[in-house]
Amino acid sequence: MPQQRTQQTVKIIPLGGLGEVGKNMLVIEDQGKLLIVDMGLRMPEEDMPGIDYIIPNITFLKGRERDIAGILITHGHLDHVGAIPYLVGKLGSPPLWASPLSKGIILKRQEDFQRQPKLKIAPIEDGKLLRIGPFSIEPFRQNHNINDNFGFVIETSVGKILHTSDFKFDDSPVNDPPTDYERLKRFGKEGVLLLMSDSTNAEQPNHSLSEKVIMENLDEIFKQAQGRIITATFGSLLNRIQQIITLSEKHGRRVAIEGYSMKTNVEIAKQLGYIKAKKGTLLSTSEVLKYPDHKVTILATGAQGEENAVLMRIINKEHKTLRIQRGDSVIFSSSVIPGNERTVQFVKDHLYRQGALVFHYKMMDIHASGHANEDELKELISYLKPKFFMPIHGQFSMMYAHADLAQKEGVAEKNIVIPENGNIINLTKNQVSIDKKTVPSNLIMVDGLGVGDVGEIVLRDRQNLAKDGMFVIIAVVDRQKGTVRGSPDIISRGFIYLRESKDLLRDVRRRVVGIVDRASGTGGAVNWVYVRDQVKKEVSDFLQKKTNRRPMVLPVIIEV
Amino acid sequence: MPQQRTQQTVKIIPLGGLGEVGKNMLVIEDQGKLLIVDMGLRMPEEDMPGIDYIIPNITFLKGRERDIAGILITHGHLDHVGAIPYLVGKLGSPPLWASPLSKGIILKRQEDFQRQPKLKIAPIEDGKLLRIGPFSIEPFRQNHNINDNFGFVIETSVGKILHTSDFKFDDSPVNDPPTDYERLKRFGKEGVLLLMSDSTNAEQPNHSLSEKVIMENLDEIFKQAQGRIITATFGSLLNRIQQIITLSEKHGRRVAIEGYSMKTNVEIAKQLGYIKAKKGTLLSTSEVLKYPDHKVTILATGAQGEENAVLMRIINKEHKTLRIQRGDSVIFSSSVIPGNERTVQFVKDHLYRQGALVFHYKMMDIHASGHANEDELKELISYLKPKFFMPIHGQFSMMYAHADLAQKEGVAEKNIVIPENGNIINLTKNQVSIDKKTVPSNLIMVDGLGVGDVGEIVLRDRQNLAKDGMFVIIAVVDRQKGTVRGSPDIISRGFIYLRESKDLLRDVRRRVVGIVDRASGTGGAVNWVYVRDQVKKEVSDFLQKKTNRRPMVLPVIIEV
């Protein structure tokens, strides 16, 4: 009776966000229908040169487009919505559900992509039940560092699945109501079969900082600052941006926003009423710079030392109007994303050299993560008392730590799963387990207009080209005489400074001519594939011996 | 009277280690004679693919080889001795002074380099005065995380310069006498004209951790561990290695050392009596693995996730004999060097996946830096009461913070200089100042056998090749007819998967043929340079339009 079995088992298929920070996307399957939660992207790793983004692998959904009941969006950060323009069209444009701010961000971003199908986005409102296919869903507001962030209680045929979204508990947040603990307790009382919870900070002890503490510390810096204030943060940290605007107003400063992503987000949020500024507070940079220094705040992107962000352009003296001047206070209100430490250090050093005062989160609490620490994660589990637990959103070590917390809060070890992207989790009323079968989850890379066309081979070539460059040798061979005409051409980049390596090049040419002459001098048909391989091998070995480098050697033999 | 002026001014020329962590080297010039302190290397930045090391720029010393009185070595870490094989020969092999352990490490490393002149290394002993040219030097033992580390009081014609080396204060160190505060106070009483002090941890609050605390925490892990213990640390952290050996003996474990650099260092240190192990404690890995799990310690390299280090090979299942097994405790006794965070996370994740328990410094104090924090730096200044102060060893922000500490301890602002590599610091009895003139300090990169031959151009090419690959087009043109023979050859790597881009390649070929035919069809002499530029431009634009990528386009036109 396979049909009956289908009704009794719900499948969860994480396609992204597990074992990594970013590209969150998961699929819940019930009675043959699919509900998708989020569709995010993530930044490439250091060994993926030239790659713009990584997006979830949706091979599993190919051929099942008609089963997709809808896509639920938790909030407007790119690691939750960034893959929408790449994927929604390919899935037959199923309907989306999103909060007003998320919707604004999604639609604005869609404008950057040509020839996209029009998105159908229905609203999410706090507590207002949604009916999507066989799923009945209660959205509930969660604190994070952007407004309009929702967790979901998803009613399925086996029971309730609770998806936390990214979240933290905050009793005094900015521009947002505080966490509604009573409601979480109610969910617990009504019974949660499976909790899927944000693991990002599961390795961090204690409780996350409240935005109120951040506000007080920032206020202190504003009080002390004699000159201009330049703040660097993410363009998507709307709550932090609101804090800076509020403090600027309090201290009589006008604010200019610098950086495309931040400008866009603030515009959307302002229109929707999520960012509040008095008339005349927000000005263009050129207008702001007419005010005396102590009346000026610049809200800029570039807290991660991003190559083209505002702060980098300022310190490199490439910005149109802004330079650092003695007395500027530069506030990094952002943590440093792993991998960016060196670049951020570079930016800090240059700020000091150019005479700025620098404030960053290691000096004082001027940034709070948007994610719950150990204490909050445990607290949530104690309210919800889920039967089954599955950590989501985070590196494996974070998910592992989170599973440990769940066990400490009383979830039985056998009721906890720590899956990976591409796993299929089978959930019944009485059991949760990971299927032996998996669905494809290898990385899909976006490079320019290409999605998924840069694979392992292209990437490996890039890595090799980066290491020692390339060395192309072109030999024109006279078909009749079987000899090399003139001197072989050499084109090399990234290997060695050619002008200073004339002897080396002469030796290489001589060797190539020798190999070709030897091969064709024997009379009879010449195996040019073999000759090419010989040239490649001999030249590679020769160059390695002479330089201890291994450029990519590419021989071309042209018969004329 | 220029000669008299020379006698009254001492010059200090930092060639490395300022505004950076690593490649420490500075020169002190007195009465025409040069004393060099350290000769280190540092690791390349992320945007320097293929580069092995960066070493100090010694252009300033060219032509002054005969003025070099000697080279003083503070301790045996690579950022203080690593450039010796690259530079000493070029400087006419001046004599070195080094402690026994440093000497052992330097000589061992020298074996890896062919055709090196024999090094002349005289001993450094604690408190034993050295006379090097016009300099009279008192070496004094400093605590760090390797034995035999020395600071120097250097008597010059204007007064005493104190160079701290890397250091921390430790009252209960491992395998080393504790800090001798009385002696530091004596130096203060005798008068220090200029203090040059280690800035690495000047941004870290409070006091550095004592190795005793680390020992206690490691002991706790040893007590709890049921299975094998695998520790990952630097091969050069000899004191940490000693701790692991001591604890293994205490808990009845045998120890195998895995990793070339660690093995080498331990061997040298053991011969000199700096590493102490009972007979039978240190075994080969295959011997150790015959013991039951709870009797086994593996001391391995790879705490930074280094590509070829032992730990990486273990988790990638490429190690000859070692695999992670359930119950292993893996201890990262090392901080994470900025830039390595992602790789270390990768390693941690895989350890968890493979069933190990992981301990790292963010969970508990199982690693202490070898550098003094704020409190110790201030304490040192209070003992020495230097007239002038110059922070060394660290990023600019660290040096800046250190200068701030010195000011707080009473050094007048005008008596503090924060120089950069390549600056010339003029020191008289009454004044310290930075000269307007500078000496060359641009980066010298080591790549394979080449030292300094990879410059900006080669590096930029590597970066560009890494981003979007390369695209070589070879058109053979019939000189008589002025037309392209056959179809142009295309060689591309790192750009796009060619097999799936046949249409694109066909279009490119067609365009190239068109450009050449147009140019040569006009009759008269053809300007092939112009044609090549045209091909480059048109193909680049076409590829960008089609793919939004910018591979390096390299056209070759061959006339036959």
Image (cartoon, coloured by chain):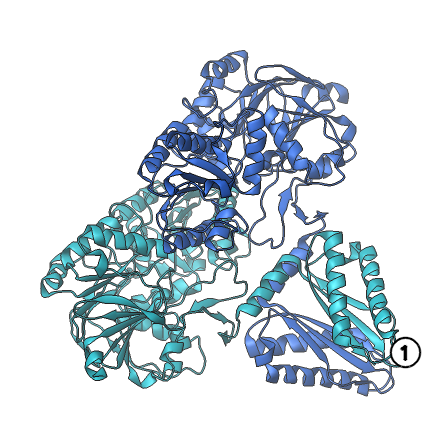
Chain colours: A cyan, B blue
Q: Nearer the viewer, residue B458 or A126?
A: B458
Instruction: Using residue A377 as the reference point, say whether residue A463 is left or right of it.
Output: right
Can residue A395 be seen here? The reply is yes
Q: Is residue A436 above or below residue B146?
A: below
Give whichever of B139, A296 is nearer the camera: B139
Q: How many marks?
A: 1
* Residue A372 in view of the camera: no
Q: Is residue B460 above or below residue B518?
A: above
Question: Which chain does the residue under circle 1 lie in?
Answer: A
Amino acid of disc 1: Lys
* Residue found at the far right of this picture: A481
> Would residue B107 appear left or right of B214 to someone viewing this image?
right
Q: Quadrant of the C terminus of chain A?
A: bottom right
- Front position in the image: A497 or B514: A497
Q: Residue A11 location, x and y as percent?
A: 26, 73
Tell me which corner region of the image, top left, top right, bottom left or bottom right, holds residue A440: bottom left
Residue A84 image position (x, y, % from top left): 37, 74
Task: Locate residue A246 relative to residue B151 in the image: left or right.
Answer: left
Q: How far from the left and from the top, in percent, is residue B164?
A: 54, 25
Residue, disc 1: A481
Q: Residue furthest front?
A: B290
Could you tell me which residue is drawn at 64 percent across and 84 percent down?
B507
Q: Residue B170: horizontal and vertical position, in percent?
A: 43, 24
Q: Secondary structure at mark 1?
A: loop
Crowding around mark 1 (Cα neighbors within 10 Å: few <14, some 14 to 19, many 20+) is few
In the picture provided, is A222 more to the left or to the right than B376?
Answer: left
The quarter of the picture where residue B84 lies is top right
